[in-house]
Amino acid sequence: MQRLVKNIIPLQKYTGLKKIGIVLLLSICVAQTTYAQMDSILVSQDSLVVKNQTFTLDDFFGHILTHHPLVRRANLFDDMAFQELRMARGMLDPVIQSDFDIKEFDDKNYYRTWNSKLKVPLWFPIDLEGGYERNSGQFLDESQSTPADGLIYAGFSIPIGRGLFIDQRRAAIRQAQLMRDLAEADQTKEINKLLFGAAKAYWDWYYAYREYDIISEVEDVALQRYNGVVKQVINGDVAPFDSLKAFINYQERDVQRVQAQLELENARLAVSVYLWATADEESDQTLPLELAEATIPLLNESEAVSIEVLAALQELAMEAHPELRKLIAKFQQTEIDRRLALEFLKPQIDLKYNFLSEQVSELGPDGSIGNGDTQQFFLNDYKAGIQFYFPLFLRKERGKLAQTNIKLEQLYFEQSYQRQLVANGILTTYNTVENLAQIIRQQSQMVNFYQQLLEGELRKFEFGESSIFLINTRETELLDARIKLLKLQTQREKSKAELYYEAGVPNLDLGTAETDNLEE
């Protein structure tokens, strides 16, 4: 039976549509030329999307991990965390500061003050400071007066109470270091989520591809049977009524094939969403790819998920699941907040000490400072101070500590729940995989049995002991059994991908995850 496109309007018979038709044809030609050029560029950029080539799930994953924009976006999480750490470490950057103030009024020099200093914060709670100060003026406070050539000072400040063991800058840096763990967990979570969606799209495509092949095969058989029945009707071997039954059966198969073709096209488009290519090596621009029609999905007979693999997945999940890693990092960050809150219960006692010396225009003959009185510089000329601060009721500090303890308790409960959720998710999916494997074995036997029934019915029909109706019935049963087996196989592959997703395996690849753990 020929498939014809009917009811095509001849544009040349309608004078009002001639110009429109010409414009449309030109537009279509230009669009097809442009699309063909773009398609050739995209295909040449990535050898995976080539006609008449098998495309495995590993190839699919590898292509996604290399080119997909969401993967490249996720890879930037670590860079973002590194910049957070850099900003936190900026609290330890040396600082140069210079202040100059002058006031003149009514021909009087009220004051001129100039103070330039270098401050070097250290990881330990010590701030080194050195600088030059020069002040003058008629109304300058005597405590701010300096020698005519200015004053050089060098010293330090250190907390001996609050902030001795941990302070805000050290807490911020340690929390920023934990941001790297959060970023890695988010990166793994985002990539796994993308790959899990890609795996489901791939197996939907495989199912649609194989379903179309099976139905097309059955349709060809139905057409051959119809042609054979027609010949038998002509020869008078069977009744004409049998040819009608055979034709109806062929039409049903043709309708199924058209529906399967639509599902295949949609499944191919769903896979194409995950296919991207880089425009060129020097640019970060990405271009979408389109899966070629003749590209073939492939189902490799995967091994059964053994108890050893399940144990490895459970162990890996408890150690490196993205959700658990995020909770652990948050717990550690909150623990740092708790330590800082405990530190704020102490009184603030800051000790400052600066050595002082007049500005040195030249060294002494023996290389000493100033007039050679080095002892005066270190022992006699100095500026020191101590600052004490302590709130009597500590309500703010005690409230902050209590709030931090509550957050830790919340994170503990959430972590316990999440661990159980992950464990149950792994076991539930594992049970599904194992159950589907058993059902697949049984369904494969049923397909063989239905195949034997059909072959026996065909032999009986050759001897005139059967009918077209029975043959069609056996054929429909076999087709349904094959489609069901195909659906079970794709469901098992989806469940296996879900198992790795539930376990939080990076890139849904247990082999890669085990290698990474060994390297660590």
Image: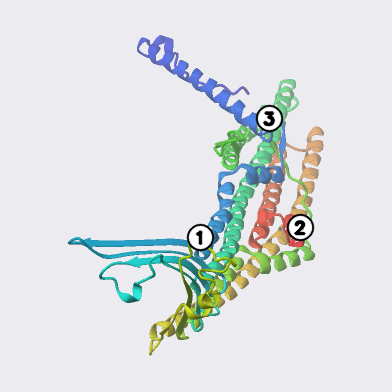
Chain-order first, disc 1 or disc 3 = 3
Compared with 465, 101 (above or below) is below
Vertical placement of 515 versus 30: above or below?
Answer: below
Residue 396 vs residue 195, the one in the foreground: 396
The quadrant of the picture occupied by the N terminus is top right
Task: Name the mark nearer the viewer: 2 or 1.
Answer: 1
Q: Nearer the viewer, residue 503 or 456?
A: 503
On the image, the x and y values in percent for residue 7 come to 47, 20
Toward which corner of the image does residue 462 lie, by quadrant?
top right
* Distance from the alpha carbon under mark 3 to that under mark 2: 34 Å
The nearer-to-camera label among 3 and 2 is 2
**Badge 3 density bin: few <14, some 14–19, many ≥20, Cα 10 Å:** some
Check the image and name the residue furthest to the front: 365
- In the image, what residue occupies the spot 47% across and 86% down? 346
As helix, strand or loop, the secondary structure at mark 3 comes to: loop
Circles 2 and 1 in contact, beta carbons < 8 Å: no
Hey, what amino acid is under mark 1?
Met
Measuring from the top left, give residue 226's x and y in whole percent.
69, 28
Closest to the camera, between mark 1 and mark 3, is 1
Give the class, few, some or many, for how many residues have Cα within 10 Å of label 2's Cα (few <14, many ≥20): few
The answer to whether 353 appears left or right of 327 in the picture is: left
Q: Residue at x 62, y 72 (%)?
A: 420
Q: Position of residue 434 (x, y in %)?
A: 73, 61
Q: Are marks 3 and 2 in contact (CB under 8 Å)?
A: no
Instruction: Tell me the element at label 1.
Output: helix
Residue 8, label in figure: none
Q: Which residue is mark 1?
A: 87
Residue type at the position of mark 3: Lys
Which residue in the structure is indicated by mark 2?
515
